[in-house]
Image (spheres, rainbow, N blue to C red):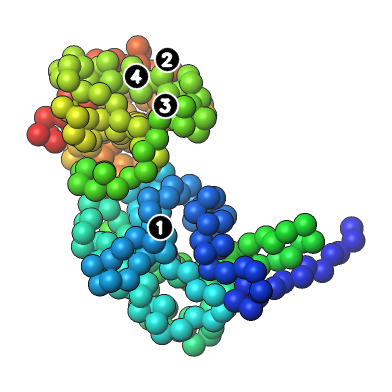
Amino acid sequence: MKHIPLKTISIKHHPQLNEKWVQEIIAADPSILGLGELVLIDKERIQPSGGRLDLLFKEIDGVTRYETELQLGATDETHIIRTIEYWDIERRRYPQHEHVGVLIAENVTARFLNVISLFNGFIPLIALQMTAIDTGDGIGLHFTKVVDALRLGLVDEDEGALEPADRAYWENRGTAKTVKISDEILELCKVFDPSLELKYNKPYIGFTRGGIAFNFATCNPRKSAMNLTVKLPRDEGIDAKLEQSGLDLLEYARWGAYRIKLEPQDIAKHKPLLEELLKAAYENRG
């Protein structure tokens, strides 16, 4: 097999490319970062300190948020301090989430690898080194994780900041069949509160009560199934019922929620148990 040398370029010194171009590429497809399935919450997010957070992402199927700063060229003190500052502001504003600071630079120097590593464990930080490759047909971006975060061990308050979606968005991300499972979940919920409706956001499908976000549970349709998150404190009785039911259980969320992978036939098969869990979460949410 013939080896083809790759031609790398410096975006910082490129006559046409700039940080804004990189920001738009990542915002359009966060998967290129290699941090899992992420959805964009905001970009150029204004901070109380007067600065702007370059990019804010959230896990599609989780509660972790990534406060992300971009830097062309080599890492410097300013961007490290800014990453930590924005991470701290966001975690104080939204303590119901887990937060990880992400610094992206074209050159993560040995000196700053040492500095970032000192913080890691106390402040969850990820450092990604970005390489721009000229393919001849265009520029490709490749990201290498050089420092990983040590994760530190009610989502409603900032829902207005989430980018809205619609049913078509979720049918494209999942399928019409799996989105229909969220309709069936809603019907179970209407038994105890007829005013509940679905609300389509890009991170998840939530619920509203009287037009106001009321997320005692959330739905995440996928291609073959739908992940249902039910916000309840962990309980031995609930654990036993779920284990005996035969439902496909995902890992219990550290922030306090049961996660269940539902296929279309599961709603009818497990209707009483699902209704019981949803009602308990609704009452617990109060």
Binning the other alpha carbons within 10 Å of mark 4 as few (below 14), some (14 to 19) or many (20 upward) gives some
User: Image check: 2 left or right of 251?
Assistant: right
Mark 1, residue position:
43
Q: Residue at x 36, y 38 (%)?
A: 164
Q: Which residue is mark 2?
A: 265
User: Disc 1 versus disc 4: distance between alpha carbons?
Assistant: 31 Å
Q: Secondary structure at mark 3?
A: helix
Query: In the structure shown, which secondary structural element does the residue marked by tag 4 occupy?
Result: helix
Examine the rendering and report whether any part of residue 225 can be seen: no
- Crowding at mark 1 (Cα within 10 Å: few <14, some 14-19, many 20+): some
Viewport quadrant of the N terminus: bottom right
Pointer 2 local density, CA inside 10 Å: few below 14, some 14–19, many at least 20: few
In primary-sequence order, the first of circles 1 and 2 is 1
**Residue at 84% over, 64% down:** 4
For discs 4 and 2, the disc positioned in front in the rendered view: 4
Circle 1/circle 2 CB separation < 8 Å:
no
Q: CB under 8 Å between callouts 3 and 1? A: no
Quarter of the view holding residue 226 = top left
Looking at the image, which residue is at 56% across and 56% down?
25
**Nearer-N-terminus badge (2/3):** 3
* Marked residue nearer the N-terminal end (1 or 4): 1
- Residue type, label 2: Gln
- Residue 245, image x, y percentages: 32, 22
